[in-house]
Image (cartoon, rainbow, N blue to C red):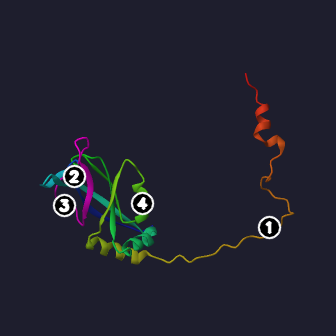
């Protein structure tokens, strides 16, 4: 199956705690179309307690089988990249995944251990995704399945719809040998 790999850089934002009982909140901020020379876990800026961190690079893998999903994302009006992070300390947070497949992003969001956000897709990435999706997209024709006719009087290899008395749990329960 054809694929294309794009290397992206991931930035996150650490906001200060709202109450004294909570810790700061680390959220994905944006992706960079190219991986910068900075080391992962580098603080880039700090303004009014809000810090921007470079968390590291990650491969964005485009699979030809997901081309229709990529087109759904591009046609949504707000093309996004889903970023999944693990950890709340930006110096040690790990970028688990980046994807442009909205259905994979939704699946990642169901994991309570991850912080998942959809961030805007930069224009160079959108162009690459659009070119890949256009090259590998094919329309799957709809084929309605037809029911097979069944003779109700014919013998069936399926289990009977009504259980016989010896197959019922209450009957088998009495036959158990208890020590």
How many numbered tags mark residues here? 4
Quickly name the residue at label 3: 36
Residue 126 percent coordinates (x, y): 31, 73
The residue wearing badge 4 is 106
Q: Secondary structure at mark 4?
A: helix
Secondary structure, magenta segment, majority class: loop
Is 90 situated above or below 147?
A: above
- Part of the protein shown in magenta: 18-39
Image quadrant containing the N terminus: bottom left
Label 1 residue SS: loop
Query: Residue 146, how many percent across, how many down?
Result: 70, 73
Discs 4/1, front: 4
Vertical placement of 84 versus 1: above or below? above
Dots 2, 4 in contact, CB < 8 A: no
Residue topped by disc 1: 150
For marks 4 and 1 on the same chain, the one whose residue lies earlier in the sequence:
4
Q: Look at 36% across and 74% down and name the residue there.
A: 74
Label 1: few (<14), some (14–19) or many (≥20) C-alpha neighbours in 10 Å: few
Q: CA distance from mark 1 to mark 2?
A: 63 Å
> Where's residue 135, x and y in %?
40, 77
Distance between mark 2 and mark 4 Cα atoms: 23 Å
Identify the residue position indicated by label 2 in the image.
14
* Quarter of the figure with residue 167: top right
Res. 76 image quadrant: bottom left
Question: Which tag, 1 or 2, sits closer to the chain's start?
Answer: 2
Q: Is residue 149 above or below residue 174?
A: below
Mark 3 to mark 2 CA distance (whole Å): 20 Å
* Upstream in sequence: badge 3 or badge 2: 2
Tell me the quarter of the picture where residue 48 sits.
bottom left
């Amino acid at each position: 199956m054809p694929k294309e790999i794009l290397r992206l850089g991931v930035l996150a934002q650490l906001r200060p705690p709202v109450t004294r009982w909570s810790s700061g909140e680390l959220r994905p901020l944006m992706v960079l179309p190219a991986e910068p020379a900075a080391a992962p876990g580098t603080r880039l800026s700090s303004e009014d307690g809000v810090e921007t961190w470079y968390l590291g690079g990650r491969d964005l893998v485009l699979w030809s089988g997901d081309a229709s999903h990529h087109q759904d994302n591009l046609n949504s009006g707000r093309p996004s990249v889903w970023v999944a992070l693990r950890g709340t300390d930006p110096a040690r947070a790990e970028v688990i995944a980046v994807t442009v497949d909205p259905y994979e992003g939704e699946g990642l969001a169901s994991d309570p251990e991850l912080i998942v956000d959809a961030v805007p897709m930069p224009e160079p990435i959108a162009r690459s995704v659009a070119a890949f999706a256009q090259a590998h997209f094919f329309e799957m024709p709809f084929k309605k399945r037809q029911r097979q006719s069944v003779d109700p009087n014919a013998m069936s290899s399926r289990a009977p719809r009504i259980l016989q008395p010896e197959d019922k749990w209450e009957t088998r329960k009495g036959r158990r040998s208890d020590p």
